[in-house]
Every structure is written in structure tokens, then in C-alpha cells.
Amino acid sequence: MLKTLSFDELAEPEVGTPAINKATIMFVVFILLGVGAGLYAQVVGHLAAFNNTREVAWGILISNYAYFAIISTGLCLLAVVSHIFGSNRLAPLANRMVFLSIIVIFGAFLIIGLELKNPHRMLLYNMLSPNITSNIWWMGTLYSMAVGFMLVEFYLILSKRYALAVTLGVLGALAEVAANTTLGAVFATIPARPLWYGSQLPIYFLASAVMTGAAAIIMFTTIAHRMRGEEMSAATREGLQGAGKVMLLTLVLIAVATVWKFVAPFVGGTEEGRMAALSLLKGPLSFNFWVFETVIGMALPFVLLLLTRMQNYKVLFYAAIMILVGAYFQRYDLVVAGQLVPVYAGWDSLPTYLAYKPSLVELLICLGGFGVVGAGFLLGERFFGKAFRYSGHH
């Protein structure tokens, strides 16, 4: 028998201050703008609304989808690890991580749904004529399975059926890991794009998932306490410290992977691969790479975390934000840089690099994805806030 949940037992109405209500309305407006832009693209045609071309077929919508999907995987993984082992530093953050993982993947789904020319066909033919040899089919199917598992897991958490919730959490995490690495394989199995091709990306995406998942829970937990105007408990502080250590470790791994991403093309790669790497080092994407990816996304957080040893929670909060900003540009630069070099580079009349700049419609759809995450977070804190308070269970 399913237990009827009482919002009186879960909700924290005091979170719904006028300022928070205005912020929620703002995020809902973002969603409406994004959906409106997506519907406009359906009417006028994607070729007219988006700045994608035949040569640069994937743009900012794909990078934003990957950004949110990867963060969702990290949150789900960290939550299930804390649930399985229990009584660890991350345990006080686990329930919020499960909820945020669901909300963030919904943001990804909104973006990819509006990016597709015929999203209804995806929903229909994904089941009627599955293509089990397609990475994209597996990615969509696995992420859908993961969402289903996590929704049931979160319901079981709310109804305090923790043992069964852990089982569903494990299934959800396995589906998320498989989906995340398959997302990497979508890029990594295209030999015509040397910057992507190879076995690195699936593992890189998984490491990035853990890093950004840790950063996301630090940021959202800090904001949640500031919204309430209350001090963090000792257990929550220890949880943030634990997440900070995870964030620092995976940041080092991402930095090493980034170095090898550039070493490989210059010690045995193709000319096209070297040109794609140079588009990041000193080409059209160099500002993104050096300022946002390297300095803001890696160097500054690394120095701050190392100097403070995760003891200063304000620094931990700002380092998490910087890592999330850097990861956003990592996704964008990866998607775009892989396509900027013409497939037939060297032929007459072909430019050294192709051009791509997101259209207003694309940017609004991305804004809609952020609206889903922002509104979902604020509404979750209001209606499920008590479930996010640590009580020592699993």
C-alpha cells in the first residue's frame, strides 16, 4: 500500500518569503520564455530559429543538455554512495542531492526536447522501433530509466521507507552512470571529429559529473540555509567539507585530463585534431578556454580550496560556483571546438575555422532550462524542506 504523504509533515512554509516568491516567479518566467522560444522554432523552422548549420550541427543547446545531464549524474552518484555507506560526511546532504538530481535532469530534458525538430517522434518511436546500436537511443533510454528510479526513490525517502529507497537509488545510479558514459560515447565514437574521438570522453564525463555534483550540492545547500537565515548544523558543515574534498580531488583529475586533451593531438594526432586544439589555445574559443575554463573553472578554485583546506565555508561556496561556471564553458567549448574545423580542411575556399554564434532563440531555450532548475529548487525547499534536514537515517 502506498502511504499518503502529508505536506504538513514535509513543508516549510516560512521559506516562502516575498523575496523567495518573487525569485520563483522569475524562474517560472524563464521557463515560459524558453518554452515559447522552442514553440517559435517549431513554427518557423529550426534552420531559421537556430544558428546551427550543416557543418556545425550541434550548438549551445547540446552543450547545455550535457551540462545539466552530467551534473545530475554527479548528484545521483554522491547521494547513493552516502546512502549505501551511511553515517558518513555526505549523509546529511543525501536527500537534497536526490531531489536536485531529478530537478536538474528535468532541466536537461526541457532543453533537448525543444532542440529536437520532432520531439513527439522521439517519445513514440523510442519504444516502437528501438535502435539498440545507437548511442543516442541508449542515452535517452537510460536517462529516462534513471529518472523513473529516482522519482520512486524520492517518494520512498519522503515516506521514510529508507531500505527500499536505497535499492532504488542504486538502480538509479547505475542507470545514470551508464547514461553519462554513453553521452560521452555519443561524441567519442565519431572518427570524423578528432578532438572528440577516442576513449577519454566517457571517463572524462564521469569525473566531471562527480566534480560538478559536489559543487552543485555545496552551492544549493549554502543557498538553502541563507534563505532560511539559519546557521548550518555541525553535521551539514562536515558534509560540505566532505563534498569539498571530493570536488578538489576530481578537479585535479579534470585538470590532468585537460592537459592530455592537448598533448595527444600534438604527439601523434591528425592535422584536423591539432587545428581543433588550437581553436581553444589561440583561436576563436581561446578566451573561453583560458579565462573561464582554466582560470575561473580550475586554477582559482584549486588555489582557494588548497589554501583554506575546506575550512572556510564562504570560500567553499564561491569555489563551487566558479567550478560550475568553468564546467559550463567546458561543455560549450568541447561541443563547438569539435566542429569548427571543416571535415574537408585544406580544400579550396574553406575557412580555417567555421563560425557559430548562438541565436537569441537558442539562448532563451537555455534560459528555460535554468528556470526549471531554479524554480524546482525553490519549490522543493518550500514543500519538502523538512525531508532535507538530517535525522541520521540511511
Image (cartoon, rainbow, N blue to C red):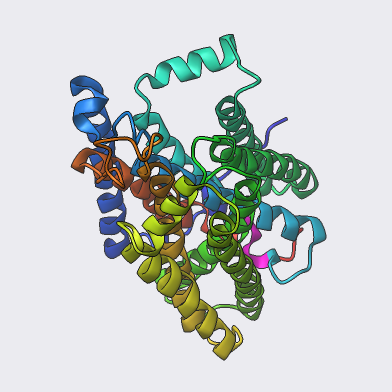
Is the C terminus in the top left, top right, bottom left or bottom right quadrant?
bottom right
Residue 106 relative to residue 306: left or right: left
How many numbered dots are placed on residues in this image? 0
Query: Looking at the image, which residue is at 28% across and 38% down?
Result: 350
Region in magenta: 92-96
Q: Main secondary structure of the magenta part?
A: helix
Is 119 included in the stretch rendered in magenta?
Answer: no
Query: Looking at the image, which residue is at 55% across and 82% down?
Result: 305
Residue 331 relative to residue 127: left or right: left
The x, y position of residue 203, in whole percent, is: 66, 51
Where residue 240 sits, quadrant-wise, is bottom right
Q: Can you name the residue that lies furthest to the top here?
A: 128
Asked if 307 appears above or below 117 in the picture, the reply is: below
Is the N terminus in the top left, top right, bottom left or bottom right quadrant?
top right
Q: Is residue 379 visible?
A: no
Judge by depth and name the residue closer to the eye, 345 or 303: 345
